[in-house]
Image (spheres, rainbow, N blue to C red):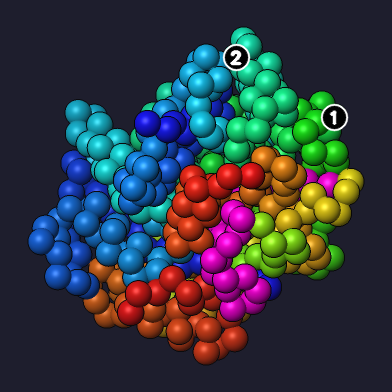
Amino acid sequence: MTLKTRIIPCLDVAGGRVVKGVNFVDLIDAGDPVQAAMAYDAAGADELTFLDITASHEGRDTIFDVVARTAEHCFMPVTVGGGVRSIEDIRKLLLAGADKVAINSAAVNDPDFIARAADKFGNQCIVVSVDAKQRLDAKVGGDNRSEWEIYTHGGRRPTGIDAVEFAAKMVERGAGELLVTSMDRDGTKSGFDLKLTRAIADSVEVPVIASGGVGKLQDLVDGVTEGHASAVLAASIFHFGTFTIPEAKRYMADHGIAMRLDAAAA
Amino acid sequence: MSTVAIIDYGAGNLRSAANAFERVAASLVSSPEIIVTADPEVVRRADRIMLPGVGAFADCKAGLDAVAGMTEVLEERVIRGTTPFLGVCVGMQLLAGEGREKVITAGLGWIPGAVEKIRPTDPNLKIPHMGWNTISVTKPHALLAGIPDGPNGLHAYFVHSYHFLTDDPAHLLATTDYGGVVTACVGRDNIFGTQFHPEKSQALGLKLIENFMGWTP
Protein backbone atom coordinates (compact mmCIF):
# COMPACT_ATOMS: atom_id res chain seq x y z
CA MET A 1 0.00 0.00 0.00
CA THR A 2 1.25 3.40 -0.91
CA LEU A 3 -0.09 6.87 -1.16
CA LYS A 4 -1.02 7.51 -4.78
CA THR A 5 0.06 10.42 -6.93
CA ARG A 6 -2.92 12.65 -7.60
CA ILE A 7 -4.13 14.01 -10.93
CA ILE A 8 -6.02 17.26 -10.50
CA PRO A 9 -7.92 18.83 -13.39
CA CYS A 10 -8.27 22.59 -12.99
CA LEU A 11 -11.28 24.53 -14.25
CA ASP A 12 -10.98 28.29 -14.77
CA VAL A 13 -14.30 29.84 -13.88
CA ALA A 14 -15.52 33.41 -14.43
CA GLY A 15 -18.95 34.61 -13.38
CA GLY A 16 -19.98 31.02 -12.67
CA ARG A 17 -19.09 29.77 -16.16
CA VAL A 18 -16.14 27.71 -17.41
CA VAL A 19 -13.73 29.90 -19.35
CA LYS A 20 -13.35 28.65 -22.92
CA GLY A 21 -15.63 25.67 -22.26
CA VAL A 22 -14.80 22.01 -21.91
CA ASN A 23 -14.86 19.74 -24.93
CA PHE A 24 -13.74 16.37 -23.65
CA VAL A 25 -17.13 14.77 -23.32
CA ASP A 26 -20.69 15.37 -24.53
CA LEU A 27 -21.97 17.81 -21.97
CA ILE A 28 -25.39 19.39 -22.36
CA ASP A 29 -23.85 22.66 -21.25
CA ALA A 30 -20.08 22.73 -21.82
CA GLY A 31 -19.88 26.01 -19.94
CA ASP A 32 -21.36 24.68 -16.70
CA PRO A 33 -18.53 24.01 -14.24
CA VAL A 34 -20.68 21.57 -12.26
CA GLN A 35 -21.27 19.33 -15.28
CA ALA A 36 -17.57 19.38 -16.05
CA ALA A 37 -16.79 18.54 -12.42
CA MET A 38 -19.20 15.60 -12.46
CA ALA A 39 -17.62 14.27 -15.64
CA TYR A 40 -14.17 14.49 -14.08
CA ASP A 41 -15.45 12.79 -10.92
CA ALA A 42 -16.83 9.93 -13.01
CA ALA A 43 -13.56 9.69 -14.95
CA GLY A 44 -11.60 9.13 -11.74
CA ALA A 45 -9.98 12.52 -11.11
CA ASP A 46 -8.35 12.44 -7.68
CA GLU A 47 -9.29 16.01 -6.81
CA LEU A 48 -10.68 19.02 -8.59
CA THR A 49 -9.59 22.65 -8.53
CA PHE A 50 -11.71 25.64 -9.46
CA LEU A 51 -9.80 28.81 -10.19
CA ASP A 52 -12.17 31.75 -10.01
CA ILE A 53 -10.89 34.42 -12.36
CA THR A 54 -13.99 36.61 -12.16
CA ALA A 55 -12.75 40.14 -12.66
CA SER A 56 -15.60 42.06 -11.12
CA HIS A 57 -16.34 42.11 -7.42
CA GLU A 58 -20.08 41.66 -8.07
CA GLY A 59 -19.60 38.40 -9.95
CA ARG A 60 -17.66 36.79 -7.13
CA ASP A 61 -20.62 35.27 -5.32
CA THR A 62 -21.28 32.97 -8.27
CA ILE A 63 -18.45 30.68 -7.14
CA PHE A 64 -20.29 29.76 -3.94
CA ASP A 65 -23.19 28.38 -5.95
CA VAL A 66 -20.81 26.46 -8.22
CA VAL A 67 -19.05 24.91 -5.22
CA ALA A 68 -22.30 24.07 -3.43
CA ARG A 69 -23.77 22.36 -6.49
CA THR A 70 -20.51 20.47 -7.14
CA ALA A 71 -20.35 19.23 -3.57
CA GLU A 72 -23.85 17.80 -3.88
CA HIS A 73 -22.72 15.49 -6.68
CA CYS A 74 -18.98 14.89 -6.35
CA PHE A 75 -17.60 12.97 -3.39
CA MET A 76 -13.98 13.93 -3.92
CA PRO A 77 -11.90 16.83 -2.59
CA VAL A 78 -12.48 20.23 -4.16
CA THR A 79 -10.08 23.18 -3.94
CA VAL A 80 -11.07 26.73 -4.80
CA GLY A 81 -8.60 29.48 -5.63
CA GLY A 82 -8.83 33.03 -6.90
CA GLY A 83 -9.83 36.08 -4.92
CA VAL A 84 -9.49 34.45 -1.49
CA ARG A 85 -8.56 37.44 0.68
CA SER A 86 -10.16 37.10 4.09
CA ILE A 87 -11.05 34.63 6.80
CA GLU A 88 -14.66 35.27 5.85
CA ASP A 89 -13.97 34.29 2.20
CA ILE A 90 -12.48 31.00 3.39
CA ARG A 91 -15.32 30.32 5.79
CA LYS A 92 -17.92 30.87 3.06
CA LEU A 93 -16.13 28.57 0.61
CA LEU A 94 -15.74 25.79 3.18
CA LEU A 95 -19.37 26.09 4.21
CA ALA A 96 -20.40 25.86 0.56
CA GLY A 97 -18.56 22.53 0.38
CA ALA A 98 -14.96 23.30 -0.62
CA ASP A 99 -12.32 21.22 1.14
CA LYS A 100 -9.34 23.47 0.54
CA VAL A 101 -8.71 27.02 -0.57
CA ALA A 102 -5.74 28.21 -2.63
CA ILE A 103 -4.41 31.61 -1.64
CA ASN A 104 -2.07 33.74 -3.72
CA SER A 105 -2.00 37.55 -3.51
CA ALA A 106 -3.28 37.70 0.06
CA ALA A 107 -0.42 35.43 1.17
CA VAL A 108 2.16 37.61 -0.55
CA ASN A 109 0.70 40.83 0.84
CA ASP A 110 0.33 39.51 4.38
CA PRO A 111 2.11 36.23 5.22
CA ASP A 112 0.48 36.23 8.64
CA PHE A 113 -2.88 35.83 6.94
CA ILE A 114 -1.79 32.24 6.25
CA ALA A 115 -1.01 31.72 9.94
CA ARG A 116 -4.43 33.06 10.95
CA ALA A 117 -6.21 30.97 8.31
CA ALA A 118 -4.33 27.79 9.28
CA ASP A 119 -5.05 28.34 12.97
CA LYS A 120 -8.71 28.83 12.30
CA PHE A 121 -9.40 26.11 9.74
CA GLY A 122 -6.43 23.75 10.03
CA ASN A 123 -3.31 23.46 7.85
CA GLN A 124 -4.95 20.73 5.77
CA CYS A 125 -7.26 23.16 3.98
CA ILE A 126 -4.80 25.98 3.33
CA VAL A 127 -3.03 25.71 -0.02
CA VAL A 128 -0.67 28.52 -0.98
CA SER A 129 -0.33 29.25 -4.69
CA VAL A 130 3.28 29.89 -5.55
CA ASP A 131 3.19 31.63 -8.94
CA ALA A 132 6.80 31.89 -10.01
CA LYS A 133 8.78 33.18 -12.96
CA GLN A 134 12.42 32.94 -13.83
CA ARG A 135 14.23 36.10 -12.71
CA LEU A 136 15.45 38.19 -15.59
CA ASP A 137 18.52 39.10 -13.57
CA ALA A 138 19.16 35.55 -12.41
CA LYS A 139 22.83 34.86 -12.15
CA VAL A 140 22.89 31.27 -11.11
CA GLY A 141 25.32 30.91 -8.26
CA GLY A 142 25.96 34.63 -8.38
CA ASP A 143 23.95 35.45 -5.29
CA ASN A 144 22.07 33.68 -2.53
CA ARG A 145 18.72 33.86 -4.23
CA SER A 146 17.02 31.14 -6.27
CA GLU A 147 16.35 31.56 -9.97
CA TRP A 148 12.67 32.37 -9.51
CA GLU A 149 10.59 35.19 -8.14
CA ILE A 150 6.96 35.36 -7.05
CA TYR A 151 4.31 37.02 -9.19
CA THR A 152 0.79 37.99 -8.21
CA HIS A 153 -2.37 38.97 -10.11
CA GLY A 154 -2.34 35.97 -12.40
CA GLY A 155 1.33 36.34 -13.25
CA ARG A 156 1.19 40.00 -14.20
CA ARG A 157 2.79 41.63 -11.18
CA PRO A 158 6.36 40.86 -10.10
CA THR A 159 7.13 41.15 -6.40
CA GLY A 160 10.88 40.68 -6.17
CA ILE A 161 10.23 37.95 -3.57
CA ASP A 162 12.36 34.81 -3.89
CA ALA A 163 10.09 31.85 -4.74
CA VAL A 164 11.92 29.14 -2.78
CA GLU A 165 12.23 31.31 0.32
CA PHE A 166 8.58 32.31 0.04
CA ALA A 167 7.51 28.67 -0.19
CA ALA A 168 9.40 27.78 2.99
CA LYS A 169 7.96 30.77 4.79
CA MET A 170 4.41 29.80 3.83
CA VAL A 171 4.88 26.27 5.17
CA GLU A 172 6.27 27.70 8.39
CA ARG A 173 3.12 29.84 8.69
CA GLY A 174 0.90 26.78 8.27
CA ALA A 175 0.28 26.07 4.58
CA GLY A 176 -0.64 22.39 4.28
CA GLU A 177 0.19 22.16 0.59
CA LEU A 178 1.79 24.29 -2.14
CA LEU A 179 0.48 24.75 -5.67
CA VAL A 180 3.60 25.63 -7.64
CA THR A 181 2.87 27.19 -11.03
CA SER A 182 5.53 28.23 -13.50
CA MET A 183 4.21 31.39 -15.10
CA ASP A 184 6.86 30.95 -17.81
CA ARG A 185 5.44 27.57 -18.79
CA ASP A 186 1.73 28.20 -18.21
CA GLY A 187 -0.11 27.73 -21.51
CA THR A 188 3.02 26.72 -23.44
CA LYS A 189 2.48 22.93 -23.46
CA SER A 190 6.25 22.54 -23.06
CA GLY A 191 6.12 20.73 -19.71
CA PHE A 192 6.44 21.80 -16.07
CA ASP A 193 9.42 23.86 -14.94
CA LEU A 194 10.98 20.81 -13.32
CA LYS A 195 13.86 22.66 -11.70
CA LEU A 196 11.47 25.07 -10.01
CA THR A 197 9.15 22.27 -8.87
CA ARG A 198 12.01 20.22 -7.47
CA ALA A 199 13.73 23.17 -5.79
CA ILE A 200 10.54 23.83 -3.82
CA ALA A 201 9.42 20.21 -3.27
CA ASP A 202 12.83 19.29 -1.86
CA SER A 203 12.89 22.23 0.52
CA VAL A 204 9.51 21.78 2.23
CA GLU A 205 7.84 19.05 4.27
CA VAL A 206 4.35 19.45 2.75
CA PRO A 207 3.10 18.07 -0.59
CA VAL A 208 3.71 20.10 -3.74
CA ILE A 209 1.31 20.19 -6.71
CA ALA A 210 3.11 20.84 -10.01
CA SER A 211 1.30 23.17 -12.38
CA GLY A 212 1.79 25.08 -15.61
CA GLY A 213 2.83 23.80 -19.00
CA VAL A 214 1.51 20.26 -19.44
CA GLY A 215 1.29 19.30 -23.11
CA LYS A 216 1.85 15.55 -23.12
CA LEU A 217 1.53 12.63 -20.72
CA GLN A 218 5.28 12.30 -20.23
CA ASP A 219 5.20 15.81 -18.71
CA LEU A 220 3.02 14.45 -15.89
CA VAL A 221 5.48 11.62 -15.26
CA ASP A 222 8.42 14.04 -15.25
CA GLY A 223 6.65 16.30 -12.75
CA VAL A 224 6.68 13.43 -10.27
CA THR A 225 9.93 11.62 -11.03
CA GLU A 226 12.05 14.71 -11.72
CA GLY A 227 10.02 17.49 -10.14
CA HIS A 228 9.32 15.45 -6.97
CA ALA A 229 5.70 16.63 -6.97
CA SER A 230 3.03 14.73 -4.98
CA ALA A 231 0.29 15.75 -7.40
CA VAL A 232 0.02 17.12 -10.93
CA LEU A 233 -2.44 19.74 -12.09
CA ALA A 234 -3.46 20.27 -15.70
CA ALA A 235 -6.21 22.06 -17.54
CA SER A 236 -6.27 22.17 -21.31
CA ILE A 237 -5.00 18.66 -22.08
CA PHE A 238 -8.06 17.32 -20.28
CA HIS A 239 -10.60 20.00 -21.19
CA PHE A 240 -9.93 19.73 -24.90
CA GLY A 241 -9.97 15.96 -24.88
CA THR A 242 -6.33 15.57 -25.89
CA PHE A 243 -6.11 12.92 -23.17
CA THR A 244 -8.61 11.46 -20.71
CA ILE A 245 -7.97 11.11 -16.99
CA PRO A 246 -7.87 7.26 -17.26
CA GLU A 247 -5.33 7.51 -20.12
CA ALA A 248 -3.15 9.80 -18.05
CA LYS A 249 -3.38 7.53 -15.02
CA ARG A 250 -2.59 4.45 -17.04
CA TYR A 251 0.41 6.13 -18.66
CA MET A 252 1.77 7.24 -15.31
CA ALA A 253 1.20 3.79 -13.79
CA ASP A 254 3.00 2.21 -16.74
CA HIS A 255 5.94 4.48 -15.94
CA GLY A 256 6.21 3.21 -12.41
CA ILE A 257 4.14 5.81 -10.55
CA ALA A 258 1.64 4.54 -7.97
CA MET A 259 -1.79 5.67 -9.16
CA ARG A 260 -5.34 5.10 -8.02
CA LEU A 261 -6.84 3.09 -10.87
CA ASP A 262 -9.98 1.74 -9.19
CA ALA A 263 -12.05 4.88 -9.75
CA ALA A 264 -11.74 5.29 -13.48
CA ALA A 265 -15.05 4.73 -15.22
CA ALA A 266 -13.55 4.34 -18.68
CA MET B 1 -38.69 8.27 10.47
CA SER B 2 -35.25 7.47 11.79
CA THR B 3 -32.70 10.26 12.04
CA VAL B 4 -28.96 10.66 11.73
CA ALA B 5 -27.50 13.64 13.61
CA ILE B 6 -24.34 15.23 12.21
CA ILE B 7 -22.91 17.33 15.01
CA ASP B 8 -22.18 20.95 14.19
CA TYR B 9 -19.63 22.32 16.64
CA GLY B 10 -17.86 24.72 14.31
CA ALA B 11 -15.25 22.21 13.15
CA GLY B 12 -15.32 20.90 9.70
CA ASN B 13 -16.85 20.70 6.38
CA LEU B 14 -20.37 19.76 7.38
CA ARG B 15 -21.85 20.35 3.95
CA SER B 16 -19.76 17.56 2.40
CA ALA B 17 -20.65 15.11 5.15
CA ALA B 18 -24.34 15.98 4.94
CA ASN B 19 -24.29 15.66 1.13
CA ALA B 20 -22.77 12.18 1.26
CA PHE B 21 -25.16 11.01 3.98
CA GLU B 22 -28.13 12.45 2.08
CA ARG B 23 -27.03 10.69 -1.09
CA VAL B 24 -26.92 7.34 0.73
CA ALA B 25 -30.14 8.01 2.66
CA ALA B 26 -32.03 8.69 -0.57
CA SER B 27 -31.05 5.24 -1.85
CA LEU B 28 -32.36 3.40 1.22
CA VAL B 29 -35.91 2.17 1.69
CA SER B 30 -35.89 3.50 5.27
CA SER B 31 -34.71 6.86 3.90
CA PRO B 32 -33.47 8.26 7.23
CA GLU B 33 -33.49 12.00 7.80
CA ILE B 34 -30.07 13.68 7.99
CA ILE B 35 -29.95 16.55 10.47
CA VAL B 36 -26.95 18.85 10.90
CA THR B 37 -27.34 20.16 14.42
CA ALA B 38 -25.71 21.93 17.35
CA ASP B 39 -28.66 21.10 19.62
CA PRO B 40 -27.96 18.37 22.21
CA GLU B 41 -31.69 17.61 22.43
CA VAL B 42 -31.78 16.75 18.72
CA VAL B 43 -28.73 14.54 19.21
CA ARG B 44 -30.39 12.84 22.17
CA ARG B 45 -33.35 11.83 20.00
CA ALA B 46 -31.24 10.73 16.99
CA ASP B 47 -30.99 7.08 16.01
CA ARG B 48 -27.42 7.48 14.76
CA ILE B 49 -24.75 10.07 15.51
CA MET B 50 -21.87 11.30 13.35
CA LEU B 51 -19.08 13.51 14.69
CA PRO B 52 -16.99 15.24 12.01
CA GLY B 53 -13.86 17.30 12.64
CA VAL B 54 -10.97 18.93 10.82
CA GLY B 55 -8.15 21.11 12.06
CA ALA B 56 -6.21 20.75 15.27
CA PHE B 57 -7.15 18.33 18.06
CA ALA B 58 -7.16 20.98 20.80
CA ASP B 59 -9.32 23.37 18.75
CA CYS B 60 -11.83 20.65 17.96
CA LYS B 61 -12.02 19.57 21.60
CA ALA B 62 -12.51 23.17 22.69
CA GLY B 63 -15.21 23.57 20.02
CA LEU B 64 -17.06 20.49 21.24
CA ASP B 65 -16.75 21.59 24.87
CA ALA B 66 -18.16 24.99 23.94
CA VAL B 67 -21.51 23.43 22.93
CA ALA B 68 -23.27 23.29 26.30
CA GLY B 69 -24.53 19.85 27.16
CA MET B 70 -23.27 18.12 24.00
CA THR B 71 -20.60 15.90 25.57
CA GLU B 72 -23.05 14.85 28.32
CA VAL B 73 -25.67 13.84 25.73
CA LEU B 74 -23.07 11.96 23.69
CA GLU B 75 -21.99 10.01 26.75
CA GLU B 76 -25.57 9.27 27.68
CA ARG B 77 -26.45 7.99 24.20
CA VAL B 78 -23.21 6.38 23.09
CA ILE B 79 -21.47 5.19 26.25
CA ARG B 80 -24.37 4.41 28.59
CA GLY B 81 -26.72 3.80 25.65
CA THR B 82 -26.10 1.90 22.44
CA THR B 83 -26.64 4.52 19.72
CA PRO B 84 -24.41 3.78 16.70
CA PHE B 85 -21.67 6.42 16.52
CA LEU B 86 -19.31 7.35 13.69
CA GLY B 87 -16.38 9.73 14.22
CA VAL B 88 -14.47 11.04 11.20
CA CYS B 89 -10.90 12.43 11.06
CA VAL B 90 -10.44 14.60 14.16
CA GLY B 91 -13.96 13.49 15.15
CA MET B 92 -12.42 10.01 15.41
CA GLN B 93 -9.23 11.20 17.09
CA LEU B 94 -11.30 12.85 19.84
CA LEU B 95 -12.29 9.34 21.02
CA ALA B 96 -8.77 8.92 22.40
CA GLY B 97 -7.71 9.55 25.98
CA GLU B 98 -5.45 12.34 24.86
CA GLY B 99 -4.20 14.24 21.84
CA ARG B 100 -0.51 15.09 21.54
CA GLU B 101 -0.74 17.66 18.74
CA LYS B 102 1.36 20.70 19.71
CA VAL B 103 -0.06 20.54 23.26
CA ILE B 104 -1.43 17.67 25.31
CA THR B 105 -5.22 17.80 25.39
CA ALA B 106 -7.63 15.38 27.05
CA GLY B 107 -9.94 13.65 24.57
CA LEU B 108 -13.30 11.99 25.22
CA GLY B 109 -11.50 8.86 26.43
CA TRP B 110 -13.99 6.44 24.90
CA ILE B 111 -11.25 4.31 23.37
CA PRO B 112 -7.99 4.08 25.33
CA GLY B 113 -4.99 5.45 23.46
CA ALA B 114 -3.34 8.65 22.27
CA VAL B 115 -3.13 10.70 19.09
CA GLU B 116 0.46 11.04 17.93
CA LYS B 117 2.33 12.54 14.98
CA ILE B 118 2.90 10.23 12.01
CA ARG B 119 6.59 9.44 11.67
CA PRO B 120 7.24 7.81 8.29
CA THR B 121 10.46 5.79 8.14
CA ASP B 122 11.20 7.33 4.74
CA PRO B 123 12.19 10.99 5.34
CA ASN B 124 11.16 11.86 1.78
CA LEU B 125 7.52 11.17 2.56
CA LYS B 126 5.54 14.37 2.95
CA ILE B 127 3.52 15.42 5.97
CA PRO B 128 0.49 15.70 5.93
CA HIS B 129 -0.34 12.24 4.59
CA MET B 130 -2.61 13.73 1.94
CA GLY B 131 -4.41 11.85 -0.80
CA TRP B 132 -5.66 8.41 -1.74
CA ASN B 133 -4.45 5.24 -0.08
CA THR B 134 -5.76 1.70 0.27
CA ILE B 135 -6.62 0.19 3.64
CA SER B 136 -5.98 -3.15 5.25
CA VAL B 137 -8.68 -4.56 7.52
CA THR B 138 -7.07 -5.97 10.68
CA LYS B 139 -10.35 -7.02 12.28
CA PRO B 140 -13.51 -7.59 10.23
CA HIS B 141 -16.31 -5.18 11.06
CA ALA B 142 -19.87 -4.57 9.83
CA LEU B 143 -18.92 -1.06 8.64
CA LEU B 144 -16.13 -2.44 6.45
CA ALA B 145 -18.23 -5.24 4.96
CA GLY B 146 -18.22 -5.35 1.17
CA ILE B 147 -15.26 -2.98 0.88
CA PRO B 148 -12.35 -4.56 -1.01
CA ASP B 149 -9.13 -3.91 0.96
CA GLY B 150 -5.44 -4.61 0.38
CA PRO B 151 -3.16 -3.18 -2.33
CA ASN B 152 -5.74 -3.85 -5.06
CA GLY B 153 -8.69 -2.69 -3.02
CA LEU B 154 -10.63 0.55 -3.05
CA HIS B 155 -8.99 3.80 -1.98
CA ALA B 156 -9.85 6.16 0.85
CA TYR B 157 -9.03 9.88 1.00
CA PHE B 158 -6.74 10.82 3.88
CA VAL B 159 -5.49 14.19 5.03
CA HIS B 160 -3.80 14.22 8.42
CA SER B 161 -0.48 14.59 10.21
CA TYR B 162 -1.47 12.73 13.39
CA HIS B 163 -3.05 9.36 14.00
CA PHE B 164 -4.69 7.36 16.77
CA LEU B 165 -2.57 4.72 18.52
CA THR B 166 -4.94 2.49 20.48
CA ASP B 167 -3.73 0.92 23.73
CA ASP B 168 -5.69 -2.25 22.99
CA PRO B 169 -4.92 -3.86 19.62
CA ALA B 170 -8.50 -5.19 19.59
CA HIS B 171 -9.70 -1.60 19.05
CA LEU B 172 -7.65 -1.21 15.86
CA LEU B 173 -9.86 -2.25 12.94
CA ALA B 174 -8.03 -1.11 9.80
CA THR B 175 -4.68 0.39 8.89
CA THR B 176 -2.99 2.00 5.94
CA ASP B 177 0.68 2.22 5.07
CA TYR B 178 2.67 5.43 4.87
CA GLY B 179 6.28 4.68 5.64
CA GLY B 180 4.95 2.41 8.37
CA VAL B 181 1.60 1.39 9.79
CA VAL B 182 -0.90 4.23 10.11
CA THR B 183 -4.27 3.85 11.82
CA ALA B 184 -7.24 4.01 9.45
CA CYS B 185 -10.19 2.75 11.56
CA VAL B 186 -10.80 2.17 15.26
CA GLY B 187 -13.82 1.00 17.19
CA ARG B 188 -15.49 -0.95 19.93
CA ASP B 189 -19.12 -1.91 20.59
CA ASN B 190 -21.34 0.79 19.03
CA ILE B 191 -18.44 3.18 18.35
CA PHE B 192 -16.58 3.41 15.04
CA GLY B 193 -14.07 5.94 13.80
CA THR B 194 -12.27 6.57 10.50
CA GLN B 195 -9.14 8.63 10.01
CA PHE B 196 -9.95 9.03 6.32
CA HIS B 197 -12.91 11.01 5.01
CA PRO B 198 -15.75 8.70 3.88
CA GLU B 199 -17.59 11.75 2.49
CA LYS B 200 -14.66 12.37 0.12
CA SER B 201 -13.83 8.76 -0.68
CA GLN B 202 -16.19 8.08 -3.57
CA ALA B 203 -17.21 4.37 -3.77
CA LEU B 204 -15.46 3.25 -0.56
CA GLY B 205 -16.89 6.14 1.42
CA LEU B 206 -20.46 5.78 0.21
CA LYS B 207 -20.36 2.04 0.99
CA LEU B 208 -19.08 2.69 4.53
CA ILE B 209 -21.81 5.29 5.12
CA GLU B 210 -24.41 2.84 3.81
CA ASN B 211 -23.07 0.19 6.20
CA PHE B 212 -23.26 2.70 9.06
CA MET B 213 -26.91 3.51 8.26
CA GLY B 214 -27.81 -0.16 8.49
CA TRP B 215 -25.58 -1.03 11.46
CA THR B 216 -27.15 -2.64 14.51
CA PRO B 217 -24.23 -3.13 16.91
Q: Position of residue A44 (x, y in %)?
A: 40, 69
The amino acid at mark 2 is Val
Stretch of the chain drawn in magenta: B142-166
Residue located at (38% from left, 83% from top)? A247
Look at the image and tell me in which quarter the N terminus of chain A lies. Answer: bottom right
- Is residue B66 shown above or below B97? above
Q: Is B156 inside the magenta-drawn segment?
A: yes
Q: Position of residue A232 (x, y in %)?
A: 48, 67
The secondary structure type at the circle numbered 2 is: loop
Give the residue furthest to the right.
Answer: B167
State which chain disc 1 sits on.
B
Q: Position of residue A224 (x, y in %)?
A: 57, 74
The amino acid at mark 1 is Ile
Q: Residues within 10 Å of mark 1 (few under 14, many from 20)?
A: few
Of residues A59 and B204, the one nearer the viewer is B204
Q: Position of residue B116 (x, y in %)?
A: 82, 44
The secondary structure type at the circle numbered 1 is: strand
Q: In the rendered structure, which disc, 1 or 2, sits on the residue that comes first in sequence? A: 2
State which chain disc 2 sits on.
B
Residue located at (62% from left, 70% from top)? B149
Of residues A73 and A115, the one nearer the viewer is A73
Q: Residues within 10 Å of mark 2 (few under 14, many from 20)?
A: some
Q: Which mark is residue B104?
A: 1
Residue located at (59% from left, 78% from top)? B152
Residue B182 relative to residue A133: left or right: right
Residue located at (58% from left, 45% from top)? B216
Q: Is residue B96 visible?
A: yes
Disc 2 target residue? B67
